[in-house]
Amino acid sequence: QVQLVESGGGLVQSGGSLRLSCAASGSFFSINDMGWYRQAPGKERALVARITRGGRPNYADSVKGRFTISRDNAKATVYLQMNSLKSEDTAVYFCFGTDWKNSNYWGQGTQVTVSS
């Protein structure tokens, strides 16, 4: 089992920056990909970014050039640096991890609110 705990959400003005962190505990050795989804009110959960154990990132088109995902395997932590934030980035952000059996683990979510 893997437990994921997010931190770093909050309220920021349009154009500002936030950094999300997601710390994993438990059987982290079994985790391959990690990343972030987000869910805005009335919308489905959507992928924001993911990163392989080796550090190869993949981004949704809507955040390319503004967000950067990274991970520190020694600290069992994945990060999401969000720059040039827009009001449409407002959502609950969920950390996830996928293990070698393709089982998904989720954090509890952290709210990001961008005011215009």
Image: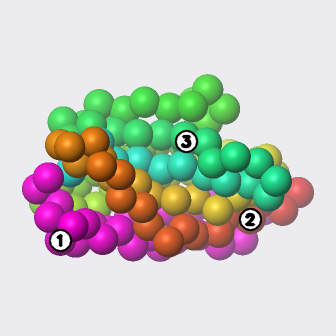
> Element type at marker 3?
strand
Residues shaded magenta = 1-30
Residue type of the residue flagged with mark 1: Gly
Whether residue 88 is visible to the viewer of this picture, yes or no, is: yes
Residue type of the residue flagged with mark 3: Val
Identify the mark nearer the N-term, 1 or 2. Answer: 1
- In percent of width and height, residue 108 lies at 50, 71
Image-based side of 22 in relation to 44, left or right: left
- Residue pointed to by mark 1: 26
Q: Residues within 10 Å of mark 2 (few under 14, many from 20)?
A: many
Mark 1–mark 2 CB contact (< 8 Å): no
Q: CA distance from mark 1 to mark 2?
A: 30 Å
- Residue pointed to by mark 2: 113
Residue type of the residue flagged with mark 2: Thr
Q: CA distance from mark 1 to mark 3?
A: 24 Å
Q: Which of the numbered marks, if any, corresponds to residue 48?
A: 3
Q: Residue at x 14, y 64 (%)?
A: 27
> Element type at marker 2?
strand
Image-based side of 96 in relation to 24, left or right: right
Position of 37 relative to 57 (above/below): below
Quarter holding the C terminus? bottom right
Indicate which label's residue lies in the foreground, 1 or 3. 1
Q: Residue at x 70, y 58 (%)?
A: 91
Image-based side of 55 in relation to 37, left or right: left
Identify the mark nearer the N-term, 2 or 3. Answer: 3
- Dividing the picture into quadrants, the one containing residue 5 is bottom left
